[in-house]
Image (spheres, rainbow, N blue to C red):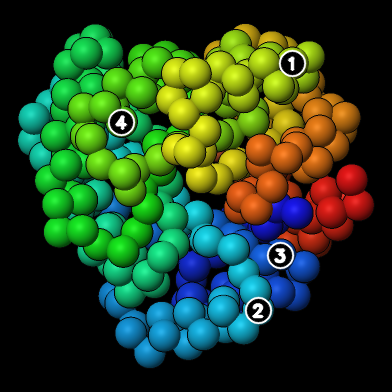
């Protein structure tokens, strides 16, 4: 059985998130390491981190899947902004060390006209530098919908980054809405898409999933999340995902348009599948 959870607000601290997760039946969760649209991070609280780690263990949680800020674009064309994004990544990974063993997922970025190859080099350079100290965190590249000049809309692009970085503690988080919007038909052929992932990237690199239905049709390259079972993926697709032997034991994070009660209901729904 996969671990299931949702995005939670980090404003009350890490232990509060663990308790909030437990109150809605989650055994993993996601949180933004800093304001998702800005760059400010809360000061660290080692006692809160230690208490949260203990509560995670006692509660039988799977790995958490922290999320980097949307604004962190490691392959933006402006060198100064790019350098700032790289320093944000570095700071995020350093801060994740207070919660050892968890995952940190982020959007590879948008190349804004520079082209994929230049972008891959820039993303890889930032990752190499930020991961160099060897913090106890597994970093995940999110599969993207391929909106605009987004990098990571194909398994091949993610593989380019993985190869350029060349580290075992770098993996992939598969977002169900993004891959479907991106042209991977997990509705008609989940097995085929996973086989493709294995062929191009290797399933050993698949560490986590984002569970979202999609407001848009197949290959629309749009990225608009819908509640589970209410969009173009449909409940049957999530039934297959929940039962899939290659996906068991992975943390799965809901990023659907919900408040806590809605998340609680979706977690219950997914477990009942
Ligand atoms: Fe994301
Ligand atoms: Fe996502
Ligand atoms: Zn999305």
Count of numbered marks: 4
> Which sits earlier in the primary sequence, circle 3 or circle 2?
3
Task: Tell me, for residue 91, which label it has, or none.
Answer: none
Give the number of the mark in front: 3 or 2.
2
Q: For mark 3, what is the residue?
A: 26
> Which sits earlier in the primary sequence, circle 3 or circle 1?
3
Residue under the image location 57 percent in, 77 percent down: 56
Q: Quadrant of the N terminus?
A: bottom right
> Which sits earlier in the primary sequence, circle 1 or circle 4?
4
> Which sits earlier in the primary sequence, circle 3 or circle 4?
3
**Lateral position of residue 267 relative to residue 248, left or right:** right
Residue under the image location 55 percent in, 45 percent down: 208
Contact? badges 3 and 4 (CB < 8 Å): no
Q: For mark 1, what is the residue?
A: 189
Q: Secondary structure at mark 1?
A: loop
x and y percentages locating residue 89 in the rendered image = 24, 49
> Which sits earlier in the primary sequence, circle 1 or circle 2?
2
Estimate the spatial distance between the alpha carbons at disc 3 and disc 4, rounded to whole Å: 30 Å
Q: Secondary structure at mark 3?
A: loop
């Amino acid at each position: 059985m996969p671990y299931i959870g949702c995005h939670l607000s980090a404003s009350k601290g890490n232990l509060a998130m663990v308790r909030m997760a437990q109150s809605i039946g989650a055994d993993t969760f996601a949180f933004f390491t800093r304001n998702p649209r800005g760059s400010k991070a809360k000061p660290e609280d080692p006692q809160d981190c230690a208490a949260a780690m203990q509560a995670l263990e006692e509660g039988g949680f799977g790995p958490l899947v922290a999320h980097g800020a949307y604004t962190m674009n490691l392959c933006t064309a402006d060198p100064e902004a790019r350098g700032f994004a790289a320093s944000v990544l570095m700071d995020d990974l350093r801060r994740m060390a207070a919660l050892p063993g968890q995952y940190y997922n982020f959007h590879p970025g948008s190349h804004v006209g520079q082209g994929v190859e230049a972008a891959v080099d820039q993303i890889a350079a930032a990752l190499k530098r930020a991961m160099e100290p060897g913090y106890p965190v597994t970093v995940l590249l999110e599969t993207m919908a391929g909106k605009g000049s987004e990098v990571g809309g194909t398994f091949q692009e993610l593989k380019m980054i993985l190869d350029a970085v060349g580290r075992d503690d770098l993996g992939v988080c598969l977002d169900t809405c993004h891959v479907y919007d991106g042209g991977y038909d997990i509705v008609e052929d989940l097995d085929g898409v996973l086989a493709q992932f294995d062929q191009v990237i290797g399933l050993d690199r698949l560490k986590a999933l984002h569970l979202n239905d999609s407001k848009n049709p197949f290959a629309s390259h749009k990225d608009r999340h819908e509640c589970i079972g209410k969009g173009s993926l449909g409940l049957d697709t999530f039934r297959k995902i929940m039962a899939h032997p290659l996906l068991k034991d992975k943390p799965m994070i809901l990023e659907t348009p919900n408040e806590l009660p809605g998340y609680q209901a979706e977690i219950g729904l997914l477990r009942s599948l």
